[in-house]
Amino acid sequence: MTAAAVRPPGTPAAAGARVEARGFGWHHPGREAPALRGIDLVVEPGERVLLLGPSGAGKSTFLHALAGVLHDDDGLSRHGELLLDGTDPDRARGRAGLVQQDPESQVVLSRIGDDTAFGLENLAVPREQIWPRVRAALDDVGLALPLDHPTAALSGGQKQRLALAGAVAMSPGLLLLDEPTANLDPAGVRQVRDAVARCLDRSGATLVVVEHRVAVWADVVDRVVVLGRDGGITHDGSPAQVLGEAADELSRAGVWVPGRVPPTRAPARPRGDAEPLLSAAALAVSRTQPSARQLRAGAGRGGGAGR
């Protein structure tokens, strides 16, 4: 039996958290327009929600607010009410886990075991409970590597799964994913999605994921919520319902909807005798990593080696 099948002793049951927003909005200091406004939403424990919308609609801001990492220092930023299990997210310590889109920026320590344990240590989990939970989390996300394996040797997809392991080790009731596959190749995308599905099946946690590639998450989520460019929620329902109602709208907003090709506009041709913006001669492009010698030689000629 794997560590994913049975929780290690001392691991709290990660029953799904409940999210409630009532007229919630957020205005970053110094910005002319609010990042988010007019959000009325209830997510019941254990629901799996895909959050969509055009760029600038406030999706990431909403996730960060739920994670409790936004602070209303001047008393003017926050509007309305946002609750996580009936509590302000700022005070729901460890109840939400956030994974962001850049794998590199989320690696904290040089060994995968220490990196996964970082959040548990900050939650003051007893030492005898930390390492069984670290091993269980790494097993959940499919990183069957020694605890002293260097994080620098991981691929992008592995680093993202490591970030996921660090989140699920804390047994959050709410898992927040902010474009977790945006910087990954197709294999890495599948690995991260499958790891998320395994973790949710084991824990029963609530999921809110922001992603532009709908097809990746269509079989994982049971609800789709669309934020409007001008605030509020424009669509809310099952994946089939929302994608049927809003497929064209989402495609125009840059969301990769199954069966839709995002509209593109051909660049205007230069007119008159304007200088060319870019020119190239005898250009060679390689997909191999250039050696340090090649880079130095290129720099000496005033150029660089391509990848």
Image: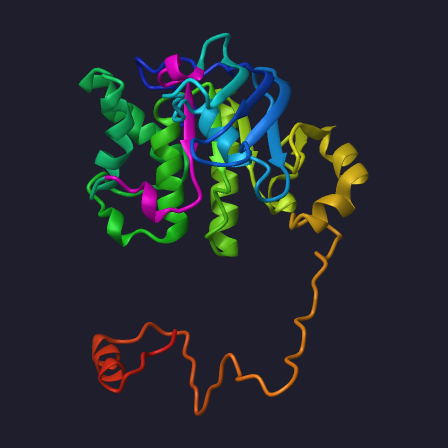
Q: Nearer the viewer, residue 282 or 160?
A: 282
Q: Residue furthest bottom?
A: 282
Residue at x 21% of width, y 79% of height: 296
Colouring style? rainbow
Q: Splitting the image into 4 quarters, where does residue 20 fall?
A: top right
Residue 30 image offset from top left, x and y in percent: 43, 35
| Above or below, 187 relative to 249 | below
Q: Splitting the image into 4 quarters, where does residue 68 fall?
A: top left
Q: In screen coordinates, is 258 left or right of 166?
A: right
Residue at x 46% of width, y 21% of height: 76
Residue 199 is at least partly visible in this image: no
| Above or below, 301 relative to 247 | below
Q: Which residues are magenta?
A: 89-108
Residue 195 image offset from top left, x and y in percent: 47, 38
Q: In screen coordinates, is 232 left or right of 244?
A: left
Q: Residue furthest top?
A: 86
Q: How many marks?
A: 0
Q: Is residue 7 magenta?
A: no
Residue at x 37% of width, y 34% of height: 165
Residue 57 is at least partly visible in this image: yes
Quadrant location of the C terminus?
bottom left
Q: Nearer the viewer, residue 121 or 3?
A: 121
Residue 174 image offset from top left, x and y in percent: 48, 22
| Above or below, 267 relative to 233 | below
Residue 295 image offset from top left, x and y in percent: 25, 77
Quadrant location of the N terminus?
top left
Q: In screen coordinates, is 185 left or right of 1?
A: right
Q: In screen coordinates, is 109 left or right of 256?
A: left
